[in-house]
Image (spheres, rainbow, N blue to C red):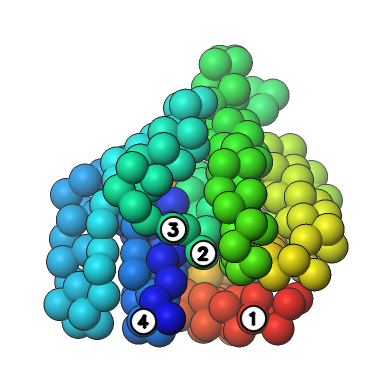
Amino acid sequence: MSRTALITGASAGLGAEFARQLAAAGNDLVLVARRREKLERLAADLHEEFGVAVDVLVADMTDPGAPAWLNAETQAQGWDIDFLVNNAGSEGPDLIRTRDWPRHDAYIRLMMTSVAAMCHEFIPAMIENGYGRVINVASVAGQLSVAGDYSYGPTKAYLIALSKALALTYRDQGLYVLALCPGFTHTDFHASERLTEMKRGMPKWLWYDADVVIREGLAALEKGK
């Protein structure tokens, strides 16, 4: 039976790797990101390689209306979303030193509120259908308290707590929810000057390839972890 997966932040990094592995498993895709050109190029490549249907929707997950719009659009197109990957995210500003609250407010919407809203929009139909898979991309940073990390890590801690509660509540109704907590992973997330410098100073054995992270995450999800 063909399933349909919706992936946010799908144009690059872990999102693109999610798309590749889910397409390879025979799932149709709805790819969501802000950059239409990159999405359409990825969609064409995946359709050609794996023969699955791939559609694109352009949305900015800092927009409070984006989750409801995505749900309405998928319903209008007749797409039943069986698999939701909340992957959109970024490093974020310094909560204390960056004196621009609207920027922080948008970051909180991107990292936490939008994920809660996507679950709110898409999970009810999964429960009704008796089948659903949700991955909320968190981070090992959400399991640690580190001096100076009072923006990124705390948002990921929320995703971990949210995912655990959803998983415990709805597993018996066919819904599996996983907080994926990558450590240091080779993606363009670390392309900024600061993170690139950090990466150079770390042992290579600490770093994982994106395909390994996604493969192990998808396997863990199917085991109900």
**109 left or right of 3?**
right
Which residue appears at 26% of the width and 75% of the height?
52
Query: Depth-wise, is mark 3 or mark 4 nearer the camera?
Result: 3
Tell me if mark 3 has few (under 14), some (14-19) or many (20+) residues whose alpha carbon lies within 10 angstroms of its own.
some
Q: State which tag comes first along the sequence, 2 or 1.
A: 2
Which secondary structure, mark 1? helix
Are the residues flagged by discs 4 and 2 in contact, CB closer than 8 Å? no
Which residue appears at 59% of the width and 62% of the height?
129
Q: Residue 148 versus residue 34: which sits nearer the camera?
A: 34
The three-letter code of the residue at mark 1 reads: Glu
Q: Is residue 178 visible?
A: no
The three-letter code of the residue at mark 4 reads: Gly
Question: What quarter of the picture does the N terminus occupy?
Answer: bottom left
CA gap, disc 3 and disc 2: 9 Å
Which secondary structure, mark 2? strand
Which residue does the numbered mark 1 point to in the structure image?
Answer: 222
Q: State which tag comes first along the sequence, 1 or 4.
A: 4
Which residue appears at 65% of the width and 76% of the height?
221
Which secondary structure, mark 4? loop
Which residue does the numbered mark 3 point to in the structure image?
Answer: 80
CA gap, disc 3 and disc 1: 19 Å
Q: State which tag comes first along the sequence, 4 or 2.
A: 4
Question: What quarter of the picture does the C terminus occupy?
Answer: bottom right
Which residue does the numbered mark 2 point to in the structure image?
Answer: 83
**125 left or right of 40?**
right
Tell me if mark 2 has few (under 14), some (14-19) or many (20+) residues whose alpha carbon lies within 10 angstroms of its own.
many
Which residue does the numbered mark 4 point to in the structure image?
Answer: 26
